[in-house]
Structures are given as structure tokens and as C-alpha cells.
Image (spheres, helix red, strand yellow):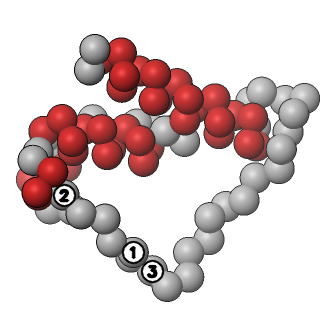
């Protein structure tokens, strides 16, 4: 990502990072200017435990953060 792009987008600080960044780029730039690339051959995806009894950790928190990010972006875009 070019440094001038970073200055114009809001970066979420939770598990909704990817949805938030993609949404910001889609909002600010033409789809012809966007692409996704792999930056590493081997990436540690930080697999999480299910944590069904604890909403503040693991997949439970991850899924809540991602859902909230998605709903926030949908709400701001109508």
C-alpha cells in the first residue's frame, strides 16, 4: 500500500481490520486501482480456540469484531 493511501483511510484496531481497510479503499478509490496480493509464502494465521463460554477471546471475539465491522460499514454506506 502506498504511504499516501494510508493517510486517507481509517484503520480498525480489532479483528475487523481487513473488512475495514477494504471498505475504506472501496469508498475512496476506483475498483480499477485496487488489487490484492500475497505478501508471504508462509503466513501464521493465528488460529484461535472456539471460546464459546468467553465472548472476550478466541473465535467468539473474532467473529463479533468482524460482524460489528461489517455492520458498521454497511450502515455508513446506506
Is residue 9 visible from the viewing direction of this image? no
Circle 1 crowding by C-alpha within 10 Å: few under 14, some 14–19, many from 20: few
* Residue holding disc 2: 34
The answer to whether marks 1 and 3 mark residues whose Cβ atoms lie closer than 8 Å is: yes
How many angstroms separate mark 2 from mark 1 (CA)?
A: 14 Å
* Residue holding disc 3: 40
Q: In this view, does 46 lie above or below 71?
A: below
Quadrant of the rendered image containing residue 57: top right
Q: What element carries label 3?
A: loop
Circle 2 crowding by C-alpha within 10 Å: few under 14, some 14–19, many from 20: few
> For this view, does 10 lie left or right of residue 32?
right
Residue located at (75% from left, 52% from top):
48
Q: Is mark 2 on a helix, strand or loop?
A: loop
Q: Residue furthest bottom?
A: 41
Q: In which quarter of the image is the N terminus?
A: bottom left
Residue located at (83% from left, 50% from top):
49
Q: Residue 42 at what x, y percent from top left?
A: 56, 82
Residue located at (76% from left, 43% from top):
58
Is residue 42 visible from the viewing direction of this image? yes
* Nearest the eye: 74 or 57: 74
> For this view, does 56 lie left or right of residue 77?
right
The disc placed on residue 38 is 1
Q: Quadrant of the C terminus?
A: top left
Q: Residue 52 at what x, y percent from top left?
A: 87, 33
The answer to whether marks 3 and 2 mark residues whose Cβ atoms lie closer than 8 Å is: no
> For this view, does 7 lie left or right of residue 64?
left
The answer to whether marks 2 and 1 mark residues whose Cβ atoms lie closer than 8 Å is: no
Amino acid at each position: 500500500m502506498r504511504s499516501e493511501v494510508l493517510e486517507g483511510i481509517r484503520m480498525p484496531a480489532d479483528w475487523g481490520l481487513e473488512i475495514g481497510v477494504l471498505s475504506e479503499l472501496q469508498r475512496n478509490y476506483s475498483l480499477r486501482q485496487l488489487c490484492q496480493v500475497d505478501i508471504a509464502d508462509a503466513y501464521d494465521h493465528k488460529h484461535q480456540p472456539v471460546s464459546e463460554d468467553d465472548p472476550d477471546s478466541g473465535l467468539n471475539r473474532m467473529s463479533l469484531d468482524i460482524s460489528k465491522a461489517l455492520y458498521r460499514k454497511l450502515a455508513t454506506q446506506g
